[in-house]
Amino acid sequence: MVARVRTVAFQGIEVMDIDVQVQMSSGVVAFTVVGLPDKAVGESRERVRAALHALGLSLPAKRITVNMAPADVLKEGSHFDLPIALGLLTAMGVLPDEEMARYVALGELALDGALTPVAGVLPAAINAQANERGLICPAACGGEAVWAGEDLDVLAPPTLLALINHFKGSQVLTRPKPRMQEEPAQQPCLRDVKGNETAKRAVEVAAAGNHNLLMIGPPGSGKSMLAARLPGLLPPLDPAEALEVSMIHSVAGLLEEGRLIRHRPYRSPHQSASLPALVGGGTRGKPGEISLAHQGVLFLDELPEFPRQVLEALRQPLETGKAVVSRVNAHVTYPARVQLVAAMNPCRCGHLDDAALACGRAPKCAADYQSKISGPLFDRIDLHIDVPAVSPADLSLPPPAEGSAEVAARVAVARAVQAERYAAVSPGGRPVRTNADADGELLERVAAPDQPGRALLTEAAERLKLSARGYHRVMRVARTLADLEGTTGVRRMHVAEALSYRRIAPGR
């Protein structure tokens, strides 16, 4: 007899069905795992053997072969421990074969038989729900699995013994309760930022339309403070977004205690981050920072200090909303629709505008420093603002009356207007939620300015040598400004303010 247990393998956030087949036959005593397993799967033999021994069970003195089909798909990860153990128990007659056929199983076994958390439970649960099967996973991941559907049969035992007792009828495993991410204790408030009213306005516009933002200013001018306060202005994730973001974090093994993410991610990698760390990759094609920030904010501080090849690799994900990781043995695509927020000094010394502090190479040092960022990457950023140093007079003033709560309320109204506008529009199957997502004929329909605004935009595009991408990004920002003001159409004043946020290349 061949015992079968279903499990899964992952390619990005996509799930592949895997059939674990266990056969016990006469012959030389051996325990072999085949089907293109990696080292972690190969080592599962010892973990399974020890876990069964902890239960008082010994493997029979037979030739045991475990095959994981399809055999040409690489099997990676420790979550194959549990399906292999269940296949052995079924082949030994401990568990009923007909019950195992109803479930998808994944989990890692400790040597004492306990089940430890594994990555990817949420997408595995969604796949099981789609195939009308139940799911068996570790207890620590149960709160994550039940989000796949109310009618999904989820068994989340703490140990292998508890699972056996459940199928024997001597113990009942209750359905886990769904878990959600806890509210942060305290969000940074815009009231802490004194001065720089123009920069605050740009941050509000960026939050309202999900636009990319670049802040240029001397050290200590408040660029990082403004970026840290942007997530507090954004609305929470809607259910579809929360599920998508949580799936990425689940595959990466970053879903803490199986809690569903409901706040927009904020990722701030260090300048030393490698290309695989930022875009994704590695031996297992894991998601990078740009995918972990999906539907949230990716903050790159000291932008020119990142390696050039790393920054250039961001160009395609910023345009398409997808990070494609291509390797010899894997071709994986992760969602990567992020709001890029970057900060940089105007030059290496940072004091270009202050003759008393600037270095002797100014202004040539500014051109050399900013040339580390390519024109195409600059072109993908909607808002470029200067953040000047805060004067001592501003620092001595009392905190401003308006904080993050007041700005977030305006942002929420603007986002609601956009959600209603794009509710029935999904070009190419991709949902449009904000003005930053609008493109092509849809953008022309919703963001076309009035006649004076069109004339100003055309003239500015010629004088500033705007690319087609830059032209359309001005239209998106102008549409967001109109939404913040509560007007139906885009006017000349909205186009003028949107143009003021465009970067003027040196020499123009």
Image (spheres, rainbow, N blue to C red):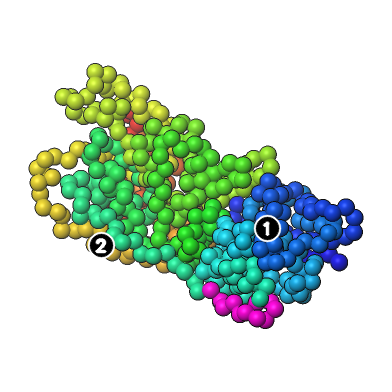
From mark 2 to mark 1, how far is it between C-alphas? 55 Å
Kind of residue sitting beneath label 2:
Ala
Q: Report if residue 63 lies within the magenta region.
A: no
At a point 66% along the width and 49% down the height, the residue shown is 40
Q: Is residue 435 above or below residue 352?
A: below
Q: Residue furthest front?
A: 56
- Between 207 and 82, the residue placed more toward the observer is 82
At a point 40% along the width and 29% down the height, the residue shown is 372
Report helix, strand or loop for mark 1.
helix
The residue at which mark 1 appears reads as: 50
Q: Which of the image's four quarters has the C terminus?
A: top left
Q: Is residue 128 above or below residue 186?
A: below
For the residues bearing labels 2 and 1, Cβ distance under 8 angstroms: no
In screen coordinates, is 286 left or right of 474? right
In screen coordinates, is 72 left or right of 105? right
At a point 43% along the width and 35% down the height, the residue shown is 272
- Between 73 and 5, the residue placed more toward the observer is 5
The residue at which mark 2 appears reads as: 405
Give the extent of the magenta segment: 166-176
Between marks 2 and 1 in the image, the one whose residue lies nearer the viewer = 1
Question: x and y percent of residue 11 in the render?
Answer: 64, 52
